[in-house]
Amino acid sequence: RLPLITVCIWSIFETIMAIFSLTWIVAALALPSWSSLESKLPVAPLPVYKESLPDSNIATEKPVLYRDEDAMCPHSQQVWLALEAKNVDYATVLVPTSEDSSPLKVTWPDGTDQTDSLEILERIQAEYPENEPNLYPKGISECVDSVRCNIVRFKGVFPRRTKANIYAPFLFLEQGGLVSSSNHMVTLEETDEVLEEYYQGPFLCGKVFTAADIVWAPFLERYAVQLPCLLPGKPELDPRGGGEYPALREWYEAMESKVPCYSCRVQGDISQWKRALELGVQQYNNQENNDDKVVLSDDVTPVFPPHEIDGQALWNQYKINRPWLANTPEEECVAYIVRNRSNIMREATEKLAISANDADT
């Protein structure tokens, strides 16, 4: 383990030095101060606040997205992805994650609030029609509204009569027990068929990314991790790695390689959705009168088939018209640490019971 730790520390060290253009000789003599590091950062990013706005006037200048601080809520993720896709100037308020309800809310500059994700997507397009992409383009003809049609189809494709669970949606039945494997198979087969209807491209409505992809994405993203972990050893329940659903696999890969704001900002990873599944199972097992406990295997991790992604090229695309972003994803991670060092040190002192000075060093 020691060589790996050494490599990681040196990699972080090299990244910090590259960002702030310091030579290794200077770094060896004295670490730069926080203020020196901060002075080298790009311009201030889109504002993010915790629990509430510090100034109510902010909401009169730009839309404000209220979403859960753990980024678990799929409906919040839908709106977050839409705002990012349209490159909207917005503020974010992170609120505590709730097991019982979605924290999603958007406050518009005219004072109105919206909590329904589908209605919010419609308004984002209406408020920013000039911002590409058009989330609701016409399909094969002016008479065919393929985007809204495929949004409506979502509820008919995914399992019905399931219990609301912010961490692991569509896995638990209202009356108790797990959704059957056969129901999940039907969902995956029908999703694959929907994608095959539009042969011109990999997305739900063909060659372009639309609001339909935004609506389906959070749930398909969780499915790809949580199904193989909950029901392991079944290729037909592995949307990405099982080889059973070629159109769906192509959709996953297109979202990651052709939608920069998704792969660079909004998409979760395997560890996040495994943790979400653990919390969802815990929530399910803690219900009253529930004798049918679910036990997860600790050694199951889905393996996604490799596909080519030029990470830096994607980041360069995402960075267009976002001057607050660093030049590389690695530099952006370091910039995030520098900007949020106070919160990081405060949590370290609270959770590790150490002094502020120790947390700083």
Image: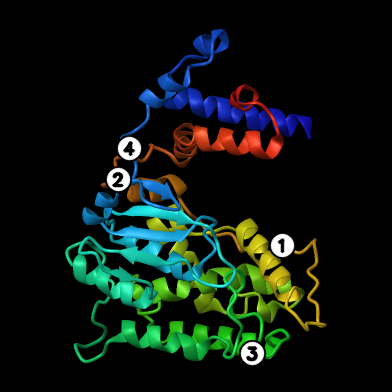
Tell us which disc is closer to us: 2 or 1.
Answer: 2
Ranked by sequence position, the earlier of labels 2 and 1 is: 1
Badge 3: how crowded within 10 Å, few (<14), some, or many (20+)?
some
The label shown at residue 183 is 3
Asked if the residue at tag 1 contacts the one at tag 2, i.e. Cβ–Cβ closer than 8 Å, the answer is no
Q: Is residue 207 visible?
A: no
- At 73% across and 69% down in the image, what residue appears? 282
Asked if the residue at tag 3 contacts the one at tag 1, i.e. Cβ–Cβ closer than 8 Å, the answer is no
Ranked by sequence position, the earlier of labels 1 and 4 is: 4
Instruction: Name the residue tied to disc 1.
Output: 301
- At 39% across and 62% down in the image, what residue appears? 80
**Image coordinates for residue 47, horizontal then vertical, percent:** 35, 46
Per the image, label 4 sits on a secondary structure element best described as: loop
The label shown at residue 44 is 4
Q: Amino acid at mark 4?
A: Ala
- Looking at the rendering, in which quadrant would you find the N terminus? top right
Q: Amino acid at mark 3?
A: Asn
